[in-house]
Amino acid sequence: MIKTLLKSVREFKKVSILTPILVFFEVILECIIPFVIAEMVKMIEEKETVELVTVLKYGGVVVILAVLSLIFGAVAGLTAAKASCGFARNLRHDLYYAVQDFSFENIDRFSTSSLVTRLTTDVNNVQHAYMMIIRMAIRSPFMFIFAIAAAFITGGRLAWIFVVVIPILGFAVFKIATKAMPMFRRVFKKYDNLNSSVQENIKGMRVVKSFVREDYEKEKFGRASRDVCVDFTRVERLLALNNPVMQLCLNIVMVFILSIGSRTVVSTGGSALNVAHLSALLTYGFMILSSLMMLSMVFVMITMSIESARRITEVLNEKSTIVSKNGALTEVKDGSIEFTDVSFKYSKSASRYALSDIDLKIESGQTIGIIGGTGSSKSTLVQLISRLYDVTEGSVKVGGVDVRDYDVESLRNNVAVVLQKNVLFSGTIKENLRWGKKDATDEEMRHACHLACADEFIDRFPDGYDTYIEQGGANVSGGQKQRLCIARALLKKPKILILDDSTSAVDTKTDAFIRKSMREYIPETTKLIIAQRISSVQDADKIIVLDGGKIIAMGNHDYLIATNEVYRETYLSQNNKGGED
């Protein structure tokens, strides 16, 4: 896990190494100051008269040491901030890019809300822990070691009190951590649920308001929020025990040193332990225990971040199930498609196949209609063509070549998909259209929009093609989104065009015009049209009827009307020609 995370340090490695070095010098200088002061007090005790110059000399040394320590500490703070913020930036970058390479199968393993939590909350936790590790976690051990050594030098046997207290503190911190870790694991899972509730509510805001379910959604969010609050309160209450335990040990040590040390000074007349050394010992005592308190804070932060680090590493180590093989082909000959003995299930552990026994041959340039009831795996079938999923059994060929032999990016560049739930991104209409072709000219975009019947509403916008599309296309209708996405796909001029129920929100006249435009504009492109309306596929070269993940009938419209009861009944019901019993 640590090895994986450290890969994201990269260009911030130098400042990450420089920070502990600066902290090292800061601590040394800080630990020398009490020793210098003790020597000055000792000198004052031993001499009847002390020259002002001598006092000023000692004072000047203390001031210089303090200023240098401050400078080293300030610079260490700056380098630590730069290193941790840079590390977090790289970590987000690596996480985001890792997700971009995921196949659908990989994405199915993580929910959207969970990925958002990992990119935000989890990265922030790891960032804070990293900053503490390269600064506080270095400063505290250095301070502890140097202060212990100096305490034995100045206080002799009295310093053994620290050796007794330290194991007690260590045991307490260990017990707290072992109880806190499982609690943090539960908390982050509930964070995912909370984010999921927020995401679902905002995404479905129109539905919520349409059904007046605001109170229900508030209560659902409130329950998720309370769950997180209760668990976090419990774990924070546990971690809060660190400070009282530390303070108790600090007070015990101070009382011991003051009582035993004062008695030793008085009883020995300062020969075994003088006032200067007692003063230094108290200072080093504070340093030792404050360093332990800092370590406990670091430990708390690391305890909190370990679960975050594990969740981040889980995403970074996830390997895409779909990758291009060495020497993969980059050129797709044509849009011909062939399914041979294809069966598919979403995971190896799945009990049933989503598709089974699929044998299908499509010539390049043909228009293929695909119909079937809900859950008949129509979308799953076409997703195998561009390797969004890989077949479980059999093979899928495009251009006469198994899709697994192509470079994935090259294959997908030759397959355009328009979904029923179309996605538009924040930006202008032009920027969204250029997802289909990066260097598309204004004329090309206008022509594609005319073919998709999108120009008729774009021209009514005051800003035309420069109209800004809100996130998710919130400021355009469902039909307008579908037409923009069809235009985007037409700009790509792919070898294969897949329309996954993508004209469901347009009227039949517009649907017919779009299909006519596609036949004329991209005649050599293979077109697969998934539809609920038979009128959308009636003029296709071949129509496939799916049921339960199997092809139950295939042929043109007239053939299916004559031979397939399911197709005929669907057609008659949609055209109001069903007879009465």
Image: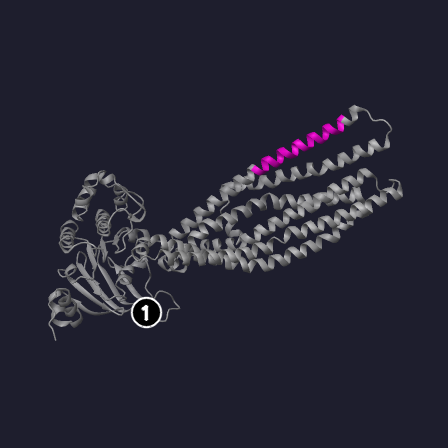
What residue would you read off at disc 1? 353
Secondary-structure class at tag 1: loop
Extreme residue toward the right, this view: 268
| Foreground of the two, 81 or 169 | 169
Which residue is rendered at x = 70% and y = 51% of the image?
Answer: 248
**Residue 136 location in percent, x, y?**
61, 44
Q: Is residue 503 left or right of residue 36?
A: left
Sort mark 1 into few (<14), some (14-19) or many (20+) by Cα contacts within 10 Å.
some
**Residue 262 location in percent, x, y?**
83, 43
> Is 25 one of the magenta-colored residues?
no
Q: Which residues are magenta?
A: 56-77
Which residue is rendered at x = 48% and y = 58% of the image?
Answer: 227
Residue 475 in sight from this viewpoint: yes
Position of the C terminus, as image quadrant, is: bottom left
**Residue 401 location in percent, x, y?**
27, 59
Residue type, numbered disc 1: Tyr
Q: Is residue 208 left or right of residue 26?
A: left
Q: Is residue 153 above or below residue 391?
A: above
Q: Is residue 96 left or right of residue 496?
A: right
Residue 110 in sight from this viewpoint: no
> Is 67 one of the magenta-colored residues?
yes
| Foreground of the two, 98 or 275 | 275
